[in-house]
Amino acid sequence: MLNLKAIERKGGYNFAFLDENTKREIRRKTLKAVAIPGYQVPFASPELPIARGWGTGGLQVTMSIIGPDDTLKVIDQGCDGGVNAVNIRKLLVKTTGVGTTFDTAAASIIQTRHRIPEEPMSGRQILVLQVPIPEPLRFVEASMAKTREMHSEMDYSRMWVFLYENIVKWGEITIGARYPSLVNKRYLIDPSPIPRWDVPKLHMAETLYLFGAGREKRIYAVPPHTSVEPLEFEDIRFRVEDFSGKACVRCGSDHTYMNEIYGGPGGGKLYVCSDSSRCDKLRAQRGEAKTHAGK
Amino acid sequence: MPASNAFVLRVTNLAKRYGQGCPSCYALTGPAFATNICPCCGSIVACHDIGFDLEEGEILGIVGESGSGKSTLVRCLYFDEEVTGGEAFLAAYGKGGVNLFAESSQRKRFIRNHLMGMVYQNPLLGIKPHFTAGGNVAEKLLTADVYNYADIRARAASLLTRTEIPRARMDDFPARFSGGMQQRVQIAKALANNPPLLFLDEITTGLDLSVQARVLDLVKEIQRELGIAMLVVSHDLGVIRMLADRTAVLKNGRMVEIGLTDQILEDPQHQYTQLLVHSML
Ligand SMILES: Nc1ncnc2c1ncn2[C@@H]1O[C@H](COP(=O)(O)OP(=O)(O)O)[C@@H](O)[C@H]1O
Ligand SMILES: [Mg+2]
Ligand SMILES: [Zn+2]
């Protein structure tokens, strides 16, 4: 188990590492992103001394919005203990001194890669997603100038044809993560590589979702109470991953996004929650229930 | 407005100039000067003072030599180009009382996606070679807000069959098709949204003669079956004679004559039309 108390704020850096001008720039662009849901807002910032691909986009957003009273949770693929999560948490705590938590409900800011927590979040929380490729139209068009024009004209027909041809070829839409979704009936977004399972959580949510792309320096947002509709045909609907008949071997939950692991008796497949902290929570509750029953 | 013949498309005073223009542009160009280039400012007056009604179920031919402004005219009507002046009305839009050119670009896109079809001389201007043949038809349907996969699939199959693309080639890429086949995919796509109005710009130019005849037959049949009003542009009077009920003759950006195709061919009034007709005999 990680010891969260062991990380302490170090001097010598500005609060949250970034200089105040950069933070102001990113906050301004974040406000714009919130004002135009789903629209990719370019931002300017000096290069971070951190390799791209380590979530620099999300990191810069978090660094710009975090305050000393925040409680931070960082997850990577649903797991608080992933290498990426541990390093980002370390950097943020060292440069801010904020408290951190594994408990989704206790966090005020959650930075994440590839997952949205299973526990419902409130309007007092902000989820910051790390985005490798912000442009949903990259599937169908390489030129940035062209995709910008397509967004401005709301011309998503080529994405639709891509889905049509996907079905022609495979009998179904094969996009797993990064499922193109229409925000506020206007802008198409790449919701980052979250599984389809997580896409409905963006729709009419209580929580503000901020998306930061470091390489391409883009911020976009899904504000609370905003519609987010995965593209679907009238007769071939969007579907989330199917875990029916499966349950987590650790906590027993059967309505959660699960990872497949091998190693069951006889080398069979086992399933385990991807959201590790919720899994721990449920396990603990189950344990308590057992103890109570035993008294 | 004359109430006798219902128009599908009405065009009045359409003008398109390339270049910044000067007060003499229109006075010093046209057939009388045998040029569309303004001697004062060098601007090109590609179209000026063009007006006509396209009636229900009619094929109107637009004929004229290369550079006379035919393509510019249809490109303006399909909103590929912005006009310099003039008006256009569609019976199917705003009860025929709204000048299309004054609409927002978003409305223009709606009109084009829902109410018009276009077939360009170069098939690759109208279809995308890296979409399948069916995908190209699907694209037009999707822009016209048809989001039912089974419907799209069925409509694409029936249109491609109608334009003589074998069902087995429906999911192939037009990049591998012959020019005639690509042109027929383009026609299928243009028809997808069931438009009341179709523009065809030199659709057989560049095709082999035998292939030309097949494409023209197809257009004629489709027109008879669906009763779509068509604006058929060609520099070739043979094509016009085969397809068009009425014909307008363009010369140096001006419309010099319009009338029944038979009359224009048998008894051309304008001196230029006489030349044009005699040159083909
Ligand atoms: N984009 C353009 N810029 C400048 N001149 C153009 C452009 N497009 C067409 N023109 C000119 O406009 C005139 C009409 O061209 P076009 O409509 O293509 O004729 P047609 O189709 O009858 O051969 C020609 O003189 C042509 O050179
Ligand atoms: Mg032309
Ligand atoms: Zn679990």
Image (cartoon, coloured by chain):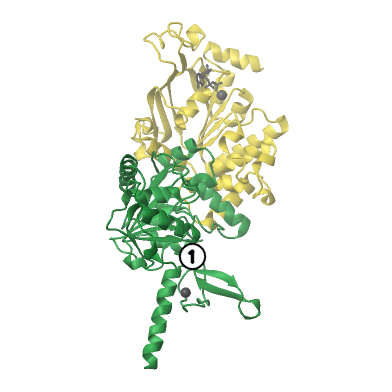
Chain colours: A green, B yellow
Is A194 drawn above or below residue B66 in the view shown? below
Q: Name which residue type carries label 1.
A: Val
The residue beneath circle 1 is A240
* Quadrant of the rendered image containing residue A269: bottom right
Residue A43: image location, x then y, percent: 38, 40
User: Left or right: where does residue A39 sit relative to residue A163?
Assistant: left
User: Left or right: where does residue B71 sit relative to residue B168?
Assistant: left
Q: Chain of mark 1?
A: A
- Quadrant location, the C terminus of chain A: bottom left
Quick check: can you spot residue B190?
Answer: yes
Residue at the extreme front of the image, as rendered = A11
Is B48 drawn above or below residue A17 in the view shown? above
Front residue (pair A179, B32): A179
Secondary structure under badge 1?
Answer: loop
Front residue (pair B253, A75): A75
Which residue shows up at 34% across the image and 41% down it?
A22
| Ligand 2 placement by image quarter | top right
- Would you call the spot at circle 1 few (<14 residues within 10 Å), some (14-19), or many (20 or more)? some
Residue A8: image location, x then y, percent: 36, 58
Cβ of mark 1 under 8 Å from ligand 3: the answer is: no
Which residue shows up at 44% across the image and 48% down it?
A56
Residue A10: image location, x then y, percent: 36, 53
Q: How many marks?
A: 1
Is A170 drawn above or below residue B181 in the view shown? below
- Quadrant location, the N terminus of chain A: bottom left
Residue B256: image location, x then y, percent: 49, 16
Quick check: can you spot residue A229?
Answer: no
Front residue (pair A191, A226): A191
